[in-house]
Amino acid sequence: MRDTLEALDAGEIGVAEAESRLTGYATTKAGRFDAAREHRRGIPEAILAEGKTPAEVAALTATAVETTGRALVTRASDDDAAAIRTEVDGGVIGRSTDASPAVDHDERTGTVVVHAADFDPPSFDATVAVVEAGTADSAVAGEAAVVAREIGATVDRVDDVGVANLDRILDQRDRIREADVVVVAAGREGALPTVVAGLVAAPVIALPVSTGYGVGGEGVAALEGALQSCSVLTTVNVDAGFVAGAQAGLIARAVDAARET
């Protein structure tokens, strides 16, 4: 505690970082940021932009970078990303001793990742394959990929292999079998996760996507199909890319730890 107070008094750290060291979170006008989540759960705290103003998203992003060295924003709009870039360009987001942070905005996935110049991204020896049935599923699949990558896994994207033509998935099965854990994103009837789970030995996480229409549309059929899968797999909620990516990342980390023993 004394070291933290002395660093604050010397101007080496800000109030938000001092609070996060002492309590595990930092208080902002936009809410409390859980700076200790990664140490506690192995998953970086994510800022859900949905339901927040761009100014609130930018403020929380600044706090995340100050306290943890990075920020992971999900469901971000172009306005959210613009607000974050404005804060970076204005020197609001960053640390007192480093250059401008790196900002990666993926418009399709709705994610914004900000790394301070001195941030050392985690990395371990395990691969997550993120498999998507079709282009309409890529936004949700991409969110899962970003999250797994931020946790430290190597991510292999396998795109457009839906069951409308089984040859598309069969000619990628050897590649998918090399992964330590597999996330499969599919909408419509959601058959792809069951097919993949019958082809690989690794754990499979079904990620239903809200594509489709009519009876069973908006991801309902995909979710129910995954829950009734005759191939063994785990299922997350509709469009829950963050959850799928986080679970895959945790499994991949455990695989890496087992390899080191």
Image: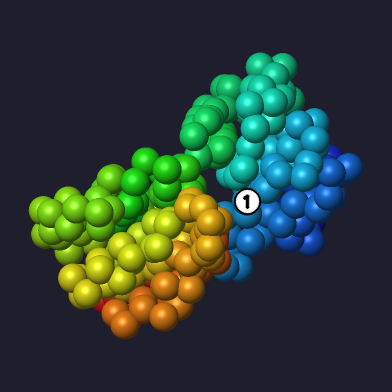
Residue depicted at x 28% and y 45%: 160
Residue 101 visible, this orientation: yes
The amino acid beneath tag 1 is: Ala
In the picture, residue 60 is in which quadrant?
top right
Residue 245 visible, this orientation: no
Give the SS element for disc 1.
Answer: strand
Graded by Cα atoms within 10 Å as few (under 14), some (14 to 19) or many (20 or more), the crowding at tag 1 reads many
Q: Nearest the camera: 257 or 221?
A: 221
Residue depicted at x 45% and y 78%: 227
- The image position of residue 67, as x and y in percent, is 68, 45
Q: Is residue 44 above or below residue 146?
A: below
Q: Which residue is mark 1?
A: 46
Q: Is residue 40 above or below residue 10?
A: below
Residue depicted at x 62% and y 43%: 75
Q: Which residue occupies the extreme right position in the image? A: 29
In the picture, residue 193 is in which quadrant?
bottom left
The quadrant the N terminus occupies is: bottom right
| Left or right, 23 with reference to 79 | right
- The image position of residue 154, as x and y in percent, is 31, 51
The quadrant the C terminus occupies is: bottom left
- The image position of residue 159, as x and y in percent, is 28, 45
Q: Nearest the camera: 183 or 35?
A: 183
Q: Which residue occupies the extreme top position in the image? A: 89
Residue depicted at x 25% and y 54%: 164
- The image position of residue 61, as x and y in percent, is 69, 38
| Left or right, 253 with reference to 11 | left
| Left or right, 172 with reference to 62 | left
